Image (cartoon, rainbow, N blue to C red):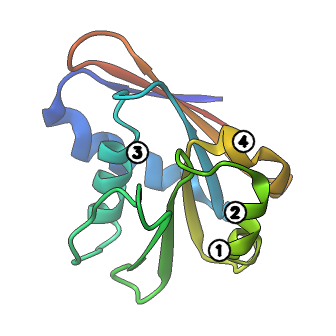
Amino acid sequence: MEVIQINTLKDLKKAARQFIQLIGNNRVFAFYGSMGAGKTTFIKAICIELGVNENITSPTFSLVNEYITGDSRSLYHFDCYRLKNLREAYDIGADEYFYSGELCFVEWPEKIEELLPPETVNVTIRVLSNESREVIINP
């Protein structure tokens, strides 16, 4: 287990860099946290540090956004909040993304846990105060 502290928004870039150093060969990351905990904000910071030049937004309505990193690799960002059932995840091909070998960041993974690969890394973002967060990474 690794813990990354974010005391203010100014620490976000440094925290994203720390997270990237921990990625290793892992490809699928399940981001847990309450509404407003900062899951999308943290994923956006990671994407920026990975060299994504596109506008990074929450895939709330599209369910999945694809970005291209600085080393020309695909990165998939999922928001499963609106999924009503596992069938909808299958319909968008979520399982194919998860086994693509590309980075996958999944918000609201509770909705599709049965579909996630066994080697998925769980990332929990805990709200400590208005700006302060704790990112807990459990491989």
Horizontal side of residue 69 vs 48, given as left or right:
right
Find the distance from the CA under tag 4 to the CA under tag 1. Answer: 26 Å
Find the distance from the CA under tag 2 to the CA under tag 4. Answer: 27 Å
- In the rendered structure, which amino acid carries the disc numbered 4? Pro
Could one spot residue 12 in this view of the protein? yes
Quadrant of the frame with the C terminus: top right
Q: For numbered disc 3, what is the local secondary structure?
A: helix
Instruction: Kindly identify the residue that appears in the image at 67 percent across and 60 percent down.
Output: 26
Residue 23 vertical position relative to residue 108 in the rendered view, above or below:
below
Disc 1 + disc 2, Cβ < 8 Å: yes
Crowding at dot 1, Cα within 10 Å, few <14 / some 14-19 / many 20+, comes out as few
Q: Earlier in the sequence, mark 4 or mark 1?
A: 1
Instruction: Kindly identify the residue that appears in the image at 61 percent across and 51 percent down.
Output: 83
Give residue 139's mark: 4
Q: For numbered disc 1, what is the local secondary structure?
A: loop
- Report x, y in % for residue 17: 35, 51
Find the distance from the CA under tag 2 to the CA under tag 3. Answer: 33 Å
Instruction: Kindly identify the residue that appears in the image at 70 percent across and 80 percent down.
Output: 100
Q: Earlier in the sequence, mark 3 or mark 4?
A: 3
Which residue is disc 1 drawn over? Answer: 92
Crowding at dot 4, Cα within 10 Å, few <14 / some 14-19 / many 20+, comes out as some
Observer-nearest of 31 and 35 = 35
Which residue is disc 2 drawn over? Answer: 88
Residue 47 vertical position relative to residue 83 in the rendered view, above or below:
below
- In the rendered structure, which amino acid carries the disc numbered 1? Ile
Which residue is disc 3 drawn over? Answer: 18
Of tags 3 and 1, the one toward the viewer is 1
- In the rendered structure, which amino acid carries the disc numbered 3? Gln
- Report x, y in % for residue 136: 55, 28
